[in-house]
Structure formats: C-alpha cells, structure tokens
Amino acid sequence: MSYIVDFFKYTSIVVIGLLPIMNPLTTFPLFMSLTNRMSAEKKRKQAAKACVYAFFILASFLLLGKGIITLFGISMPGIRVAGGIIILILALRLVFSGNDPSSEVESSASDIKKADMDYSFSPLAMPSLAGPGSIAVVMGFGSQIPSGQMVMGHVHILIGIAIVTTIAYIMLSASQWIEKLLGKHGTQAISKIMGFLLTCIAVQFLASGIRDFYVEFSSLSTTATL
C-alpha cells in the first residue's frame, strides 16, 4: 500500500513541477499557425509526433543529460538562446504574413499536400515543448533521486513526463475544433496575434539566455580574479 502511495506522490510531484514549465498553452499558438493548412489527420499526427519526440528528448536528458552537455560543450543558456532564435524567425514570419510556408503555393489540393511540412521535432518538440526549462526541471528531478532508489526514481520521473506529454497531445489535438469555431478570417486574425505572442516568448528566451550567459561568465571572471 505504501508503495502505491509513494508512486502517486512522487509521480504527482514530477507532473506538478514539469507541466507549468512545459506549458502546452505556449506551444498551442505555434502549433495552430504552423499546421493551419494541414488536414485534421495530419494535425493529429504532428501533435502525436511532437509529443513523442518531446518525451524522448526529456527522457534522454534525464538519463544522459550531463554526458550530452559535457560531450558537446552545450550550456543551458546556449540551448535557451538557440531556441529563442528559432521561435523568433517563425514568429516574425507569422506577424508579417499571417501564414506558414505552405501559403506560398497555390491552393490546389496537390500543392497544399506538397506544402505540408514536418514541424513535429523542430520547433514543436524542441525547443517549444522540450525546451531549456523543461530539460532543466527533468535534470533537477534526476539529481534529487536518492542513491538507493535510482531505478524507481527514474521510473517515477519517466511516467511523470509521459503524463505531461499526454496532456500536451490532448491540448494540441483540440486545435482543429478551435479553428472550426473561429472560421477562416478568425483564424487569420488569430495568426497575427499568435505571431506577436510568439515574438514575445522568443524575446524572453533570448533575454533569459543572454542574462544567464552574463551571470555565468561574470562568476567565472570573479573566480579567476580571486
């Protein structure tokens, strides 16, 4: 009985800690805009693939995070800045055009089919869902696992990640119903608004990454001086 209680307790802690950081609501406008010209089936596949990729990205950093960062010499501020640049480029495209790259072709069924692009890994899974914040939270949970409970500790975290990515999939899959409710002109208007919001998110990514770079290098300079 205590095992079941502990299982729900620690898994809930992971979900509560990760969900606000991943925050699928911030990915929703990006997903809705990028998949605007896709069929309902294609949208569901993009949502499913993005969430599966996000799960494996976070799981990889949970199990191999320190090794990956050390091997490639990547820092969390670097990941945050890179993610901000990717999102900023897409956001500015939405602000000034209101559509994704598929809008650049004719609207025939064959052309739209050719224009369907795979956004599931980047930018949907990374850096949107499995961004620097989510990676940091997962690695933080991993570092707090007691030495005698490594296996079960990692299982709890992996299940927590699975629950959060499932919630993200449900939210992203609902985009088609929202588009039907808004209609064509409503969707175009929302695209502009979403582009602006994504620009704000991207700038926040860049600002926080640059700030972290400054703090990191300042501490290194201070240490070197001492």
Image: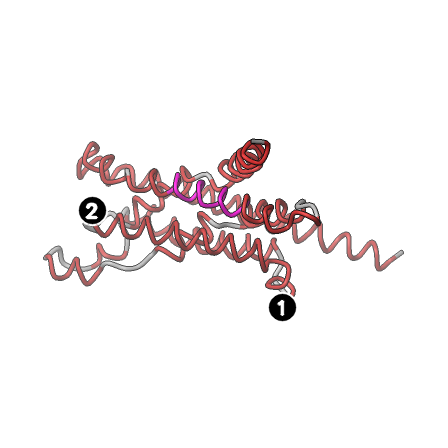
The C terminus lies in which quarter of the figure?
bottom right
Q: Residue at x 22, y 60 (%)?
A: 115
Image location (x, y in percent) of residue 129:
44, 47
Q: Which residue lies furthest to the front in this view?
A: 1
Q: Which amino acid does label 2 sit on?
A: Ala
- Left or right: residue 170 versus residue 125 is left
Q: Residue at x 63, y 46 (%)?
A: 140
Q: Name the residue under label 1.
A: 71
Question: Label 2 belongs to which residue?
Answer: 40
Badge 1 element: helix
Task: Residue 54 in the image: state x and y as whole percent.
Answer: 44, 52
Disc 1 marks a residue whose amino acid type is Leu
User: In the rendered image, which quarter is residue 32 located in?
Assistant: top left
- Percent across and percent down for residue 189 are 26, 37
What residue span does the magenta drawing correspond to? Answer: 157-168
Tell which residue pokes out farthest to the right in this image: 226
Q: Is residue 54 in the magenta section?
A: no
Quadrant assignment for the N terminus: top right
- Check disc 2 and report its element: helix, strand or loop: helix
Q: In this view, does 57 lie above or below 28?
A: below
